[in-house]
Image: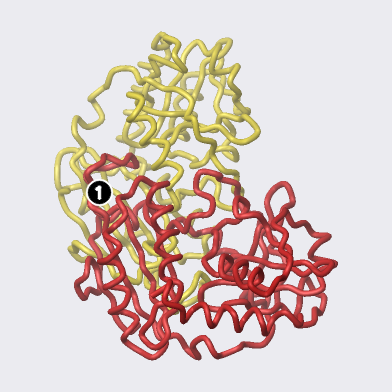
Chain colours: A red, B yellow
């Protein structure tokens, strides 16, 4: 770890009564930074604000967050900044929000090995054995209740996979355990609708934008096992891996699609744009 | 707060890289202690061990846990001891369990206002507007992913209720946000089966044991809205409130059932027994 801060001060610990620890009562963002600049910061802060609204946590001052994230981003050429906002210390025992809690900002900076220009080998991806639970109240936001992802990513590592795809009880594949999913089918890009995503990824939004910029057709619709079996190409996306091409999908070899390089290039450019500064 | 310890040492904070904070990657027990004795400790530790097995967290040494809980229990005549076990500090970034993490023991002691002899007014209970998600992998264990309970208990307080009942997508009422549920129907006690409970309560087990001791018939079966509407009596249970009679159930007045006092008395006695020392 390069550094850590709590409410703007260098720290190695947090209060033992923090509701983030006790209940996962908080949110986080994983922000990739290069050359001292956090990429897609505006989109990360927008999602954080949505999560705060859902959980009734007061959104911290955005200018303060930007300053603190920038401080963390400056610690190395390439940095993964993890920003957490919890409801803060409990005002009383028990689950209920009392109102009047003071949200806590927690920032950790890790070296980003390779940075954005390291292109890993195409990803090995398959369906997870576990199902993902359906909780519309919490869907899309990046909250701190992540045991399903912990178990799924652990399964991925055990099976020698880079990612596992999560499936609902009604057989919709809603994305990966740490990524969103895009397929190529019939000359179009297909991805689960935002409302179906466990987390609505910032990089998901960037890929949609990049595809639009390239004039590629995108369809947001539910994805099933059949779609996985017939896909002509696939990417998994998150803030760190960008648009990672899938090379093996549910045991089947998949060619890296010709759209990969242009999409990646657009996303790289977008990450340097002023709108995200 | 009366006191707090991390891994046996007095502490007011935990490591900022604890996976309990980052992912809710851990478990907890809420243990009620009276006269320096934690009640039903064996049952609490058994559930903790089950949770550790499910999450592949090494169960801390039971003798150490007993010593540390007893230390917390001794701080006041009546104490609520919260025992958390997290996977400990992350060995690397990301969700996946790496193996080799060192579990962390976190204990907080709060004064238990009133203790076990304070019998509050019958509880006001109604159905929560939110549904509870179905995740069989995590069911029954008392893990740290508790946002559903946070939102449900907050709804209860907003509506002036003591508890709200959680309903699945397929219309089963599986219990309260912080309690298990028992109804009286046709001279029998009815409660959702253990496999349907969000958390399989220690006090749930004690009520079943007390009912058996009194020769009362108990049926474990799924509960629906109709059962709520027709129940002749009801209790909600947890380690702190014991068998709390329900006085208002989904807007309808319910009489405190004649079995309440004998059940409470049996549970009180059981809490003093040596098997739980």
Q: Residue B274 placed where, x, y %?
A: 33, 41
Residue in front for this viewpoint, B62 or A270:
A270
Q: Dot 1, crowdedness within 10 Å: few (<14), some or many (≥20)?
A: many
Identified at 69% across, 79% down, the residue is A245
Q: Residue A107 placed where, x, y %?
A: 32, 71
Identified at 29% across, 70% down, the residue is B15
Residue B7 seen in this snapshot: no
Residue A102 seen in this snapshot: yes
Q: Quadrant of residue B116?
A: top left
Task: Classify the position of the N terminus of chain A by image quarter.
Answer: bottom left
Say left or right for A60 vs B148: left
Q: Residue B139 placed where, x, y %?
A: 55, 47
Residue in front for this viewpoint, A141 or B213:
A141
Residue in front for this viewpoint, A38 or A2:
A38
Q: Chain of mark 1?
A: A
Identified at 61% across, 30% down, the residue is B172
Q: Residue B196 placed where, x, y %?
A: 59, 38
Q: Which residue is mark 1?
A: A90
Q: Secondary structure at mark 1?
A: loop
Task: Classify the position of the C terminus of chain A by image quarter.
Answer: bottom left
Q: Quadrant of residue B80?
A: top left
Identified at 45% across, 17% down, the residue is B249
Image height of A57 relative to B179, above or below: below
Image height of A277 relative to B35, above or below: below
Image height of A161 relative to A60, above or below: below
């Amino acid at each position: 770890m390069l550094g850590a801060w709590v409410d703007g001060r260098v720290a190695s610990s947090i209060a033992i009564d923090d509701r983030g620890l006790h209940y996962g009562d908080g949110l986080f963002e994983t922000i990739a930074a290069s050359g001292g600049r956090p990429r897609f910061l505006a989109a990360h802060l927008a999602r954080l604000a949505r999560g705060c609204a859902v959980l009734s946590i007061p959104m911290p001052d955005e200018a303060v967050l930007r300053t603190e994230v920038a401080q963390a981003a400056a610690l190395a050429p390439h940095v993964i900044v993890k920003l957490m906002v919890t409801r803060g210390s409990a005002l009383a025992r028990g689950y209920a929000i009392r109102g009047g809690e003071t949200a806590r900002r927690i920032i950790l900076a890790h070296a980003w090995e390779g940075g954005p220009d390291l292109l890993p080998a195409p990803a090995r991806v398959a369906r997870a054995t576990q199902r993902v639970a359906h909780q519309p109240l919490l869907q899309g936001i990046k909250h701190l209740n992540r045991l399903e992802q912990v178990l799924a990513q652990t399964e991925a590592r055990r099976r020698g996979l880079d990612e596992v795809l999560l499936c609902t009880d009604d057989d919709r594949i809603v994305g990966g355990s740490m990524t969103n999913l895009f397929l190529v089918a019939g000359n179009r890009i297909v991805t689960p609708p935002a409302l179906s995503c466990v987390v609505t990824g910032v990089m998901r939004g960037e890929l949609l934008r990049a595809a639009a910029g390239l004039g590629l057709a995108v369809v947001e619709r539910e994805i099933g096992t059949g779609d996985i079996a017939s896909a002509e190409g696939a990417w998994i996306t998150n803030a760190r891996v960008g648009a990672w091409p899938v090379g093996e999908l549910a045991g089947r070899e998949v060619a890296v699609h010709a759209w990969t390089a242009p999409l990646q290039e657009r996303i790289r450019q977008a990450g340097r744009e002023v709108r995200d500064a």
